[in-house]
Amino acid sequence: MNGFTLTPVETKPLSFALPVIGAAGGFAGLFVGTAHGSGAMGIAIGAVALILLAYLALVVFGLGQEKVTRWGIFALFVITGFLLAALPGIVLGVLSGLFFSWFIFWIGEGRYRANLAPYLTSGQVLWHYTFRVICGAIFVFLITPILVVMPLSFNAQNFFTFTPEMLRFDPAGYSLKHYQDFFTSSGWQQALRNSLAIAPVATLLSVSFGTLAAIGLSSEHVPFRRAIMAILISPMIVPLIISAAGMYFFYSRIGLQGTYFGVVLAHAALGIPFVIITVTATLVGFDRSLTRAAANMGADPVTTFFRVQMPLILPGVISGGLFAFITSFDEVVVVLFVGSANQQTLPWRMFTGLREQISPTILAVATILVVISIALLTTLEYLRRRSERLRGMSPG
């Protein structure tokens, strides 16, 4: 039929490619259809449209016209997005066009097997990509709340939802007034000062005690070291509400409840397990003959620790300290039990704002905390890779 008749060699890959591409189109159509009032209709239209588009791209035009075809698919998605939702639709059309113009040829030409072992069966290939899709879906599920909160913090209205102006990308729908409220409000600034006064001190105590405990428990001659390790890391396992209630009753008896020092000790207790775990993992690759050599050269234990051992385990110590800082800075349950109004931290203030008054400033504070956490975790990953390089391990 005018050169478009499929041969048996061409039919087999298309019998696999077209249903897969159609399933992807149906998944994308689910979201578009739901936004327009009918998810089922969106699935059907998306699946059929992508199957037809893939057939035209792979059979009618073929691989020889791949570059032109991909640009055509991209333009079609952009135009469709504009017709459906104006400027927001253009943004979604650009993203969808870039993905599907690549995905159609990636599946249709069998390029998905290019980087896989040739002896893998179809089931193994299917599981290989299914597993990655599942991991990606979990990641999207976990990251979506953050992606929602961050743009909402720039809402020009006092709403916890996207306004029509925001959905149209109208500049009038966006504002920095919630951030301005955070930096000018005496209540929010006092909560920030409390967090900055508590978290660093708690981190210092966590790092000091956690590092010493990890070094001591890494020695095989310490009796009951497994039981002691289990007790020290129990705050990571026991529900926070139980730990908080226990700290409240204990601190009330010894006069620490409602004091700055009591809150610091409580946060330090929560951070110590993270330090112990990271330092213990670093000590696994530590060569203990270095400390014995330093002792043979006349160095006392303190000098040996600071001049020989600490430089080598420093990445693990810093990693544990970052975890302890994030735990203290973001913690709200324990401080509600053992703190007082004078120790109101940022998370406590956010909790109060949600319970007593729906203040949109909470969204701005949440965005700031997310940015701080991402920066600290990025630093943590860098230190982890550096530690592995120092121990002669591959970062992968």
Image: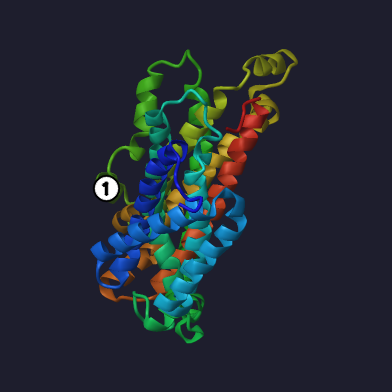
Per the image, the residue denoted by label 1 is 253
Q: Is residue 50 above or below residue 94?
A: above
**Colour scheme of the picture:** rainbow
Compared across the picture, whether 142 is left or right of 59 comes to left
Q: Residue at x 56, y 25 (%)?
A: 283
Q: Position of residue 144 (x, y in %)?
A: 39, 58
Residue lying at the far bottom of the rendered structure: 172
Where residue 73 appears, as percent x and y from the top left, is: 51, 62
Q: Quadrant of the C terminus?
A: top right
Q: Position of residue 367 (x, y in %)?
A: 46, 65
Asked whether residue 280 is in view, the answer is yes
Is the residue 40 above or below the residue 299 in the image? below
User: 158 or 298, which is in the foreground?
Assistant: 158
Q: Residue furthest front?
A: 1
Is label 1 in a helix, a strand or a loop? Answer: helix
Image quarter of residue 129:
top left
Residue at 67%, 32% in the rendered image: 311
Question: Residue 251 location in percent, x, y?
Answer: 30, 48
**Residue at 24%, 48% in the rendered image:** 245
Amino acid at dot 1: Arg
Q: Is residue 155 visible?
A: no
The quadrant in which residue 257 appears is bottom left
The residue at the far right in this view is 297
**Classed neighbour count for the residue bearing mark 1: other residues with Cα under 10 Å, few (<14), some (14–19), many (≥20):** few
Residue drawn 40% across and 65% down?
148
Asked whether 201 or 112 is in front, the reply is: 112
- From the viewer's side, name the closer residue of 269 and 116: 116
Q: How many numbered badges does the structure rendering display? A: 1
